[in-house]
Amino acid sequence: MGGGSAIGIIIILAAFGWTGVARMTRGMFLSLRNQEFTEAARAIGASPMRIMFKHLLPNSLAPIIVGITFSIGGVILTESTLSFLGLGVNKILTPTWGGMLDEANKYILDQPWPAVFSGFLIFLTVLAVNFIGDGLRDALDPRLKV
Amino acid sequence: MTSTEVILDIKNLKTYFYTSDGVVAAVDDVSFQLHKGETLGIVGESGCGKSQTMLSVMRLIQEPPGKIVSGEIHFHDENLLKVPLLKMRSLRGAAISMIFQEPMTSLNPVYQVGDQIAESLTLHQGLRGWDWGYRLVSWGLFWKWVFTGFPRETKKRLSRLKVETPAWQRSVELIRLVGIPDPEKRVFNFPHEMSGGMRQRVMIAMAMACNPEILIADEATTALDVTIQAQILELMKDLKRRFGMATVLVTHNLAVVAEMADNILVMYAGKIVEYGTAAQIFRQPMHPYTWGLLHSIPRVDQPKTDQKLPTIEGMVPNPYNLPVGCKFHPRCFKATSVCKEQEPPLEKMADGRQIRCWHRITEGGN
C-alpha cells in the first residue's frame, strides 16, 4: 500500500470533484432562465450566448464561487483522508499533511505534536480558502454592497 | 394622429400550447392591424391570450410547449414568422420593443441600470459601451481591491472612464427623457437601489433606446400603485406624442385603455370578440362580454344606488375544455340555444367595428 503519485491523486480528485459545482450551476441557470430579466434580455434582441454569459453567469457567480471554495476545502480534506488511510500519495516520496497525520497516529500518545500541527494546518488552510470565497462573493454581489 | 399606413398586420394567428394534459389554443385565429402612430388596447381577463398574442409577434413564445401553428405577421412587408432568427433578433428591441409587467424582476440585478440601457444600444446601434481601457482598468482595480481594498479616487476614475463611452452618455440622455431626476448619478444605481416606479421608467428607457416603431406594453402599469400608474401613463403618452411610435397596451385595466387607446381589441378565450375605436366600445359595447366588463366597474359620476354592481357570472373556462359553440355562452346573459351549438363568426361592420356574437346588444336595446 505505497499509494499513488501526486499527479494521479490530483487527476482522480479533479475528475470526480467538479460534479457538485456543475450540478449547482445547472440548477442556478435553470431557475434564472425563467426569470423575467432573461425574457427582457431576449426582448431587446440578445443572443442565447450573450444571455448565458452576460446575464445568467454573473447572476450565478456568487454561489459558484462559494461552491468552488467549499469544494477546494473538501478536496484537501479528501486527500488528507486518503493519505490517512494509506491510499493517498506515497508518504515517503511526497510528504502530505494527511500522510503526516497517519504517521503521527502511531505514536500520538507519546508524541502528539506531529498530529496536532498537521491537523491544525489542514484546518487552517480549509478555513482560509473558505474565507477567500466569502470575501469574493461579497465583492462580486452588488446587492450586498452598502 | 392615426394615419392609414399599416405597420403590423396580423392574419389568422394561431399559437397553441401542447402540454401533457392536452392542447391549449392560447391564441386562436386572431387578425388585426396596427397603424402607424396608433395606440391599440388589448383587454380581457387573465389567460385569454392577450400577452401570448404579443409574445407571438416578438416570437418569444416558449417552444416547446408553445408553437405558432399558423398565420402571418406582417411587419412592413416582411412576414415575421418566416424571417430567420438572426434577423428577428435584430428587430427585437430595435424596431419592436416590449415593456414587461414586473419592474421588480425585469431588470438584471447584477448590472447598473446604465449598463442595461446601454446593452440594447450596443446590440443594435453599435455604440461603444465598454472600451478596452475600461476593461483593463476595472480588472486591475478588482485585484487591487482584493489585496488592498477600494480607494475612493480610483473608483471615481473607473466611473469617469465609463461615463465617456457613447452608449453610456446616451443612457444618461434616455434616463433624463423618462423623467428620473439627477440622471448622471442615477445611471450608476443598481436596480435594487430604485423604487418600483423608477424601475418601470428604466424599463421604458430600455424599450425606447433604439426609437422603436412598435412599443408593446405588457401590463406595464399593473404592478404599480395608482399614483405611479398615472405618472407612467402620462410619460408614455408624452413619449408617444414626441416620437410617434405605435403602441400596444396589453392590460386588464379598462381605465388605462380608456385613457390611452385609439382602438380597442377585446379578447376572450384566445379569440377576438370585439374590435372598435375607443369611443365606439365605451359608448356602446355590443358584445355582452364587453358590456359586462364595462358595467362591472363602479362609477363615481353616477348617483348612488342600492343595486348590486353587475358582475360577469362564473369563471374563465378551462382552456383544456372550452365550451362548444360560443366560448362565452355559459356566462352570457343573452345566451340562447344557437350560442350553445354554433360559434358566431367575427363580423365586420360598416363603420369598421368587428364583433363575434349572435345576439349583439343594439342601441336602446338590452
Image: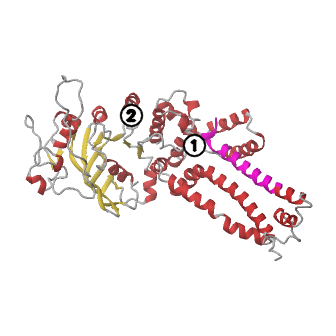
The residue to which callout 1 is attached is: B111
Given the current orientation, which residue lies at the most extreme front position? A109
Q: Residue at x 65, y 63 (%)?
A: A18
The x and y percentages for residue B292 are 19, 39
B113, above or below B342, in the image: above
Q: Identify residue type, mark 1.
A: Tyr
* Residue B5 point in image, percent of width and height: 29, 44
- Secondary structure category for the residue under label 2: helix
Which structural element holds mark 1? loop
Checking the image for residue B64, the label placed there is: none
Output the chain of dot 1.
Answer: B
* Residue type beneath disc 2: Met
Instruction: Say left or right for B100 vs B127.
Output: left
Quadrant placement of the N terminus of chain B:
top left
Find the magenta span and give its range.
A120-146
- Within the image, what quadrant is residue B283 found in? top left
At a point 73% along the width and 33% down the height, the residue shown is B153
Is residue B13 shown in magenta? no
In the displayed structure image, the side of residue B225 where residue B255 appears, left or right: left
Q: Say left or right for B71 vs A4.
A: left
Q: Nearer the viewer, residue B34 or A61?
A: A61
Q: Is residue A128 magenta?
A: yes
Q: Quadrant of residue A84?
A: bottom right
A28 up-or-down from B351: above or below: below
Point 15% across, 53% down: residue: B345
Expressed as whole percent of the image width and height from the top left, the position of residue A19 reads: 63, 64
Residue assigned mark 2 = B236
The nearer-to-camera label among 2 and 1 is 1
Label 1 CA crowd tier, 10 Å (few <14, some 14–19, many 20+): some
